[in-house]
Image (cartoon, rainbow, N blue to C red):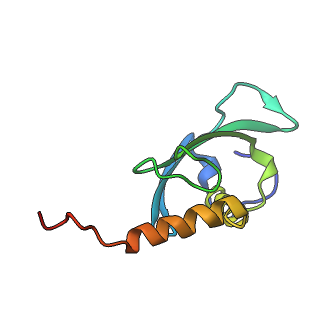
Amino acid sequence: MAYGPKRPDAIFLVDTFEKEIVWNGITIILRLNKNGCEGRIYGGFMNHLEIQTKNNEPLPITETGYKSHFFISNCLYKSVTDTFLDLLEEASKSKKWQRYWKEHQEALQQPDLFANL
């Protein structure tokens, strides 16, 4: 059983967790390895969260589409998914991401002159 405040989901009752979510049209796979490191730290267990986009698309928190993140189980007051989505929303406010996202959206609107060849 996990330590710390009660969570809105029960993912801390299992050793591994994998979930696919879609954020702004980008498919993201979240993989959680509970107790990713041995031992307790600050009253909780160290967990490992892998964040990977399906097609290696960048996210506001990673330019490569992959991020490895370690955290202590009792540091979350929401579910891992909700915490991650909050992190993405906050990071997406950066000027760098706003510029990338605008260029990305414009590129999607750009017609392909060679599509019918």
Q: Residue sitting at 45 percent across and 47 percent down?
A: 56
Q: Residue reaching furthest front? A: 113
Above or below for 8 versus 39 = below
Which sits in the foreground, 20 or 25? Answer: 25
Q: Residue 91 placed where, x, y %?
A: 71, 60
Instruction: Find the residue positioned furthest to the right.
Output: 42
Quadrant housing the N terminus = top right
- Which quadrant: the C terminus? bottom left
Seen in the image, is 62 located left or right of residue 70? left
Residue 20: % across, % down: 46, 57
Q: Looking at the rendering, which quadrant does residue 36 occupy?
A: top right
Task: Choose between 22 and 117: the one closer to the eye.
Answer: 117
Count of numbered circles in the view: 0
Q: Nearer the viewer, residue 15 or 89?
A: 89
The x and y percentages for residue 17 are: 52, 47
Residue 23 place in picture, x, y as percent: 52, 66
Residue at point 80%, 48% (across, down): 74
Residue drawn at point x = 51 percent, y = 69 percent = 24
Q: Is residue 68 above or below residue 77?
A: above
Task: Relative to 114, say whether 42 is above or below.
Answer: above
Looking at the image, residue 116 sits to the left or right of residue 11; the answer is: left
37, above or below 101, in the image:
above
Most extreme residue toward the top, as rendered?
A: 38
- Residue furthest left as drawn: 117
Q: Is residue 3 visible?
A: no
Q: Residue at x 52, y 66 (%)?
A: 103
Is residue 70 visible from the viewing direction of this image?
A: yes
Q: Nearer the viewer, residue 82 or 40?
A: 82
